[in-house]
Image (tube, grey):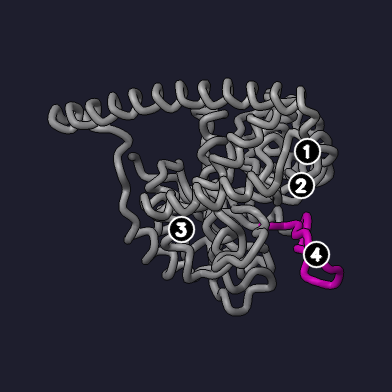
Amino acid sequence: MDRPLVIAGPCSAESESQVLETARGLKPLGVGVFRAGLWKPRTHPGGFEGVGEKGLSWLARVREETGMKTATEVAGAKHVEVCLESGAVDILWIGARTTSSPFLVQEIAEALQGTNIPVFVKNPLSPDMDLWSGALERLSGVGSLGLIHRGFTPSGSSPWRNDPLWRIAIEMRTRFPGMPFLVDPSHIGGDRRFVGELSQKALDLGFDGLMIEAHCNPSEALSDAAQQLSPSQLGEILSSLRLRRQDSDDAAYREVIDSLRARIDDIDESLLALLADRQAVSREIGRYKKEHGIAIVQAARWDEVMTSVLERAEALGLPADTVRRIFTAIHAASVRSQE
């Protein structure tokens, strides 16, 4: 693949000197876009909520001195309006909390009508692909759109701040082919120690670039200090990343990969045929239950099935969480067929 797009900069713009010092440190690394949050949504009042409009002139100086494009987050029509009026921002992004609110996304979409500024949309807090897709649909016709995967609020214990749930990001990519798709390893990891491995994972999966938080003095950052990198730390990570090509013209490679893909196609055909047979049996079970006045779902029976399936999956070396999701979906389809 070509060199990935890297958007980097502090979680928050805190002062003009902090912004410029960070930008000067990032420029030699090949960072293409400088990011800095001007408005910061905080869970509790009293925290640092950003410098607001006055930070726009700092971004203008970054662009003037370094030549990097600039980006900031918008969470409402007013933010969009002042960014556009200033001319200091080249790219906007919509954060996870805002994506989770169709009202706010609609407000932003209306404020952007008639503009050509690129807009990236982060995933919502919950793993809801329709909510994420709906935000993009509201923004259709507005400039050029892109996606940012920053992980989802975890439902249980996790080593990361946010659950990656890569399968959802991959599915979104299939829904919106050709749309630029970045990964935000800073927010997924929540700790600078994880940024490198998560960045490599993103590139291995074929995503187009990275949005990474970097600060000239991370330990003194006013927001998200734990997940920010110094420019030198970011440089070490970027230089260590391995880039994989999307494809190869090598004849031997093509022969092997085409053969393997043909086998996958045959297996998929068999799976579809088996699923169709299973649905037919489920419909027959549904008719028989209805004739005898039996409830559609027997929880105890389903628990037995799932226990048995997971035991067999373990013996076959299959990941339990994947198998659980697949069979839960199959069971849900079976229940619908019996209604």
Quadrant containing the C terminus is: top right
Above or below: residue 129 compared with residue 154 = above
Q: Which residue is mark 3?
A: 198
Query: What is the chief secondary structure element of the magenta stretch?
Result: loop
How crowded pointer 2 is (Cα within 10 Å; few <14, some 14-19, many 20+) is rated as many
Disc 2 marks which residue? 98
Residue at image point 45% right, 21% down: 273
Q: Quick check: marks 2 and 3 in contact, CB under 8 Å?
A: no
Q: Position of residue 196 (x, y in %)?
A: 42, 62
Q: Which residue is mark 4?
A: 43
Determine whether 187 is above or below 229 in the image: above
Type of the residue with mark 2: Thr
Q: What amino acid type is highlighted by mark number 1?
A: Val
Quarter of the image for the N terminus: give it.
top left
Closer to the camera in the image, 253 or 13 = 253
> Crowdedness of circle 3 by 10 Å Cα count: few (<14), some, many (20+)?
some
Dot 1 lies on which element?
A: helix
Residue 183: x %, y % from top left: 52, 49
Q: Is residue 152 left or right of residue 24?
A: right
